[in-house]
Amino acid sequence: MRQLLTEIGLGMRLAFTGGRRGWSRTLMSAVGVALGTTVLLLGASVPSMLADRGARLDSRSVFNPQQQELPPGDTVLVAEIDSAWQDVDLLGVLLWPESPAAPLPPGIPAFPGDGEMYVSPALAGALAGPGAEVLRGQLPYRAVGTITAAGLAGPQEYAYYAGRADLTERVGVHASRLARFGDIPEAEPADTSTYLILAVLITTLLLPVAIFLGAALRFGADARDRRLAAIRLAGADSRVTRRIAVAESLVPAIAGLILGSGLFLLARSVAGQISLFEISVFPADVRPVPLFAALTVLIVLALAAVMTLHGLRGVTIEPLGVFRRSLVWRGRLWWRLILPVLGLALVSPVFLSSGRVSQEIVMLGMILLILGVVPLVPYLIPLVARISPGGPVSWQLASRQLRQNPLASTRAVTGIVVGVAGVVALNSVFAAINVRPDVRDHPADPDASIIGTTDATPAAMARLNTTFQTIAGVRATTDAEYMILDPTTGWGIGNVYVGDCAALDVIADMDGCADGDTFTVGTPPKKLPLENDETINLPKKPRPAVLTGSFAQNIGTAVLLTPAATPAALSRVTPGFVTTRLRLDGVTATETGGNIRGVAAGIDPFLMVTVFVPEGDKFAVFRTALNLGATVILLLIGLGLLLDVADRLHDRRRLIGALAAIGASRTTIIVSSAAQAVVPVVAGLFLAVGTGAIVGTVLMRMDDIPISFSPGPLLTPVAGGLALIIGCTVAVLLPAARRLTSTEQLRQE
């Protein structure tokens, strides 16, 4: 044990020797480990974040497990109001206690009075920010305090608790009684499409970090090997030298763990300011699961040791020097296809199955597809090099090297290939979302609808139209909908729509319309059985019409009545829906969504407002995270490429010196070295675009996005990767050209 500790101590001391190259190697290895540690620790915190957030959601649940109305007592009347502000969900809960002992929801110190409310800190900020007047129109209450963390899903949630005394008049309709908060319904399968994008994002960012770490550990390896040879000369055997080399690699690994933990704490401190898909967490939620944190430490230390031992393969360290075995590369294709084929098999149900697909399996398949690019790149390079066996001398030199040792030519390129594949996939999804004009079922459908009233008189519907048309750029129509029943089964077989000609024109295409007209779709019966045991006669001489938009997709039989053609008996039937449908002219949903909800809240807070077109970019935060992550990764890959190119030129300095000595021009050597860097990246980027397109297609299918690709999202990452390779190669090659082509490189002790 004492000898082992001595060997470890010696290896750690050697990490701080070796001059500038040794220090650079240690520093950059530590940076790579730090970034990987940060990502792994954040990933290890996900279970805690989800558990804490879920517990807070459960504690404020207003679910009534008895499924029936409770008698008055120590109870509270509650009603949930679902709304939105700038495409972010706005949760409202209306409260009114029925006794002093009524249960209090978590997060507030007391019940708000009539017309008062407690708001979340994020909502309080919105009420004091731009557009606050429009938002206050949706919330006709006076803020008297803030909701604490115990009553919020996350710090960025928009939520409020408001007091309303008139809930006593709405029991059983909109409001219900609760004896306690915190009862939860049976869980439903969650939509994890967001986690699919997160998985691709993390894989895109994490794998290049590991590849950069390998490049950093290889940098200056020749100096390390000479030091190990000197140690062998002092009497150490090969196993001792390997243990010393592993101990040397532990220094940047341990330093990276410490630095990565600091970066994790920094990210944890700002976690409350970040919201992804309206999901936010408090800094206290971001804590790694102890088992996963321990695994992170073990993974980092094991990765450093394994990469060091892998770098010693093919190297014989003897007391009199270091010998590197050069073997002819014989790549086998079959094992390189295992990951891509397995990944394709796991994602294939997305295209072949019409039922529910396990998103966890699809997530694993996409990760395997991205990882499968790594072993395929070295096999692809010799194939590309054989396309043109002839050509100028510079190409023949480059082609020979690419065929003989493709692993050395591609080990740094794989980081760019993996990064580009992930960025192409995610950019394709974001671009497809941006070109999608809306989320309506059909282009002919309205831009928004309001449902909730039951007054179907022409005067009431006209008032609704007038009220909503006070908003600039909004055209409103209102119609009442009744269900036609099958007299034998009692099931619905069609609908009756009542409205003026403008309202009916939104529902169907008609050959002219005037008050008093009747239109039919299909062949409805002469007598129309409706709810409340009422039956009305179909007016005489109806004219045919054709339903438009989603109405044509969902309804087979319909009767459309203008007010003058409506039978008197219909007034005794309560309509299923009274719907106000809005069209936006010259304005966007972002500009008018808040005004629409504000007007609806002024009419009745329980009106259900649905805006069918996007009011904002819900992927904006993801896109920012991707751009920031891609920038960091490109910087890392650029440093890794600089190290790799410099290391390869250093290893081949005698070969390049020999070529210069026998007459090879400096231009030939420069072009040959540049080709060895550019050809692998061009071949790898071709593979990355194909893989990224497949993963992007899977993400689009899983998120019900029409599959489409634009040249920009596909070519921009490719151009960036190619420019990075060329820039790094030129940055190292040109300054070193004069020195490398000198015959002094033939000197050897």
Image: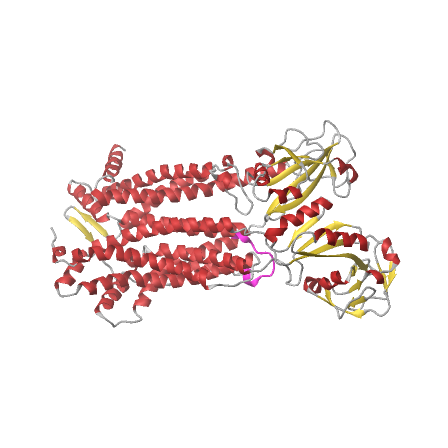
Residue 245 in percent (x, y) is at 26, 43
Can I make out residue 106 in this image?
no
Question: Residue 356 occupies which quadrant of the picture?
Answer: bottom right
Answer above or below: position of 190 versus 694.
above
Q: Which residues are magenta?
A: 350-360
Answer above or below: position of 327 versus 95.
below
Can I make out residue 108 in this image?
yes
Q: What residue do we see at 82% from left, 52% from top?
A: 574
Residue 444 in percent (x, y) is at 66, 63
Question: Residue 294 occupies which quadrant of the picture?
Answer: top left
Q: Is residue 283 left or right of residue 630?
A: right
Q: What residue do we see at 40% from left, 39% from top?
A: 263
Answer above or below: position of 380 versus 257.
below
Q: What residue do we see at 74% from left, 62% from top?
A: 502
Residue 26 in percent (x, y) is at 28, 42
Q: What residue do we see at 73% from left, 46% from top?
A: 603
